[in-house]
DNA sequence: CTGAAAGCGCTAACAT
DNA sequence: ATGTTAGCGCTTTCAG
């Protein structure tokens, strides 16, 4: 392992000069800087992270808390992860992965052991048990998701309320009068997951505004669950012609179930979804959807966190406006 | 931040005693140990990772190199990640995530900066460019996947060769005489990804052994690609009745395409897959499959790595035997 | 503009 | 069985 003293010797300067030449924290003559840089290159020097962290500097590591528990959307989480790692690298940081198995514990550990400089939380609940920890340890953080009381926190998310609204609006404009939301698995709502609830609010508010008949049904994943919910929907709302789906793995099974029961999409039934764009586009019938911009959320979270670590002011809550992309699954009613 | 000297003062002992009481690296009287443990609990002490790493000890961090590039099976990778983090925590380690965007660079950085004690590589190529780096830096590692020359390396993987064989064997026993392998996207083979190639070998060898007519076709993801490959298959092999799929997102689209062209599964065509069990089970027609035990591979990789770090001997290559689970997609020919 | 030297928090040899 | 002390590699005063 090549250390700073090796570089110093090679460049014919003192270790501190090397440190300063690399950090730029004090003026260094051009000639010296060049010699140091050459030595660094030749020896392949890379500052030891432990040493740096020890001397009170940042560890250049960000922690990412990914829940990965029942009912959460794995592709969305994976996109977060990839986007976060990529963005973090672009800002010269690495990423430590925490999963829910030890979620709250993990944050305490990261903070106490100085494993990371800051943390990104995903799958934020309305009253998230991790938030008190965060405040008490004064560990810089960014949340992907917005809790009930976001004061003093930095949050990024898709505006799920507006997304629910947008879907209903689209259906209403097409003439649909009876609509249903097929939501995430019940656990998700029981946990009071913020984004899922907000989507329901937006859906309901828009349905009321347009004076539509509406219903909301959480739903497990799986073909059987899809079939069951479809049968129930048609029994309870025989005039149903518009459906919003917020449950990515259920998209194909739902379409299949409707068609098995004689309802064509979009001929008899229009369907919109809130999910990652590729999922909507590659469904059996390409689905009109509001995209969940997982990658952008991850990238933004990192950007905010890095800015925060640098001491710059950052906005409290950033809600990304939803955008609806029309595909083959929606059509005017009764055509 | 509470440090070891705080604990020492509180317990009325020296810092080194605290260190030893915690590590157990030398005998400590029961009374002292108890006082130290009490002080640790009361103060909520947690050893600073940087300090420990600095003093030449392990950082207790494992790096996980997840490629996440084109043609990679995302659910499989996600399972690896979750299993690795969970297992690592069970062994008191954390996990640093590396993605392909900076794959080889990442390993160098981790090694040089001492960011992690060891690394787990996934998506191993036959001649993987990361391997020389690994050997030269003497960074302890475990590979999930087996390269062309695994001597001196520790590898774990599903026995993909046997898996291909097993699928063909199953089809042959059911009386099928013409079989095809619908594989992963072409990039995967071009990259010489080890497991994909091994599956092809096993498939081909078994087909030859059973004197079956066989064909191998890589295939992109997506419904259009599925349709195209199915049409081509039926044109080139009109007597086709058995298909092995090694391309998880293609399962449903393939079944749809075959049925659109008048071939019922399993009535006219038997289909087996090599993919995670849940994917096979939740396809439109539950698919007879050889499970890719992603979670178990991840767990085993961590176990091996931890053992290796402790200095214990570890096996070179561990190949997990494939297990075929019969579901609804295979039936005897011509019934 | 540069060097020497003092730590950062922890562990492990070296005392006792 | 416990305390003392010397670093680990780096950054950052403090002195030139």
Image (cartoon, coloured by chain):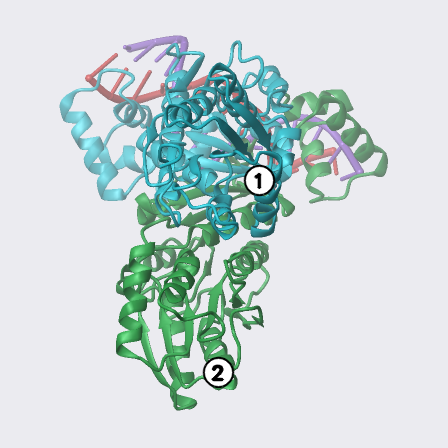
Chain colours: A green, B cyan, C purple, D red
Q: Residue furthest front?
A: B334
Question: In which quadrant is the N terminus of chain B drawn?
Answer: top left
Q: Nearer the viewer, residue A177 or A41?
A: A177
Task: Please name the residue shown 26% across and 75% down the image.
Answer: A235
Q: The residue marked by circle 1 belongs to what chain?
A: B
To which quarter of the image does residue A224 belong?
bottom left
Where in the figure is residue B120, as x and y percent of width and height? 48, 27
Residue A12 seen by the camera: no
Graded by Cα atoms within 10 Å as few (under 14), some (14 to 19) or many (20 or more), the crowding at tag 2 reads some
To which quarter of the image does residue A179 belong?
bottom left
**Residue annotated with mark 2:** A333
Up/down of B65 relative to B321, above or below: below
A272 displayed left or right of A133:
right
Where in the figure is residue A279, as x and y percent of width and height? 51, 57
**Residue annotated with mark 1:** B234
Residue B250 seen by the camera: yes
Task: Please name the residue shown 37% across and 73% down the image.
Answer: A181
SS at mark 2 in the image: loop
To which quarter of the image does residue A183 belong?
bottom left
Q: The residue marked by circle 2 belongs to what chain?
A: A
Where in the figure is residue A53, as x and y percent of width and height? 52, 37
SS at mark 1 in the image: helix
Task: Establish whether labels 2 and 1 are both on one chain.
Answer: no
Up/down of B279 relative to B32, above or below: below
């Amino acid at each position: 392992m090549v250390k700073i003293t090796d570089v110093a010797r090679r460049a014919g300067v003192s270790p501190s000069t090397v440190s300063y030449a690399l950090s730029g924290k004090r003026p260094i003559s051009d000639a010296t800087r060049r010699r140091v840089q050459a030595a660094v290159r030749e020896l392949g020097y890379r500052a030891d992270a432990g040493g740096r962290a020890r001397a009170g500097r940042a560890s250049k590591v960000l922690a990412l808390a990914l829940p990965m528990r029942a009912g959460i959307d794995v592709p969305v989480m994976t996109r977060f992860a990839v986007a976060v790692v990529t963005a973090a690298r672009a800002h010269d940081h690495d990423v430590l992965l925490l999963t829910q198995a030890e979620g709250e514990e993990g944050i305490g550990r990261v903070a106490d052991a100085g494993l990371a400089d800051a943390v990104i939380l995903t799958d934020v609940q309305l009253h998230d048990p991790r938030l008190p920890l965060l405040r008490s340890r004064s560990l810089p953080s960014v949340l992907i998701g917005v809790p009930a009381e976001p004061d003093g926190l930095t949050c990024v998310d898709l505006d799920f309320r507006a997304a629910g609204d947008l879907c209903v609006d689209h259906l209403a404009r097409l003439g649909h009068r009876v609509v249903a939301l097929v939501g995430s698995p019940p656990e998700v709502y029981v946990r009071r997951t913020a984004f899922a609830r907000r989507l329901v609010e937006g859906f309901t508010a828009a349905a009321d505004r347009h004076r539509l008949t509406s219903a909301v049904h959480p739903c497990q994943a799986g073909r059987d669950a899809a079939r069951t919910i479809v049968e129930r929907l048609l029994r309870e709302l025989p005039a149903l012609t518009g459906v919003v789906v917020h449950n990515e793995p259920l998209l194909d099974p739902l379409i299949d179930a409707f068609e098995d029961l004689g309802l064509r999409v979009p001929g008899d039934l229009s369907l919109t979804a809130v999910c990652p764009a590729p999922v909507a586009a590659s469904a059996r019938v390409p689905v009109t959807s509001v995209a969940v911009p997982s990658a952008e959320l991850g990238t933004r979270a990192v950007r905010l966190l890095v800015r925060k670590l640098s001491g710059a002011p950052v906005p409290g809550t950033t809600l990304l406006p939803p955008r609806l992309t029309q595909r083959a699954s929606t059509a005017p009613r009764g055509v």
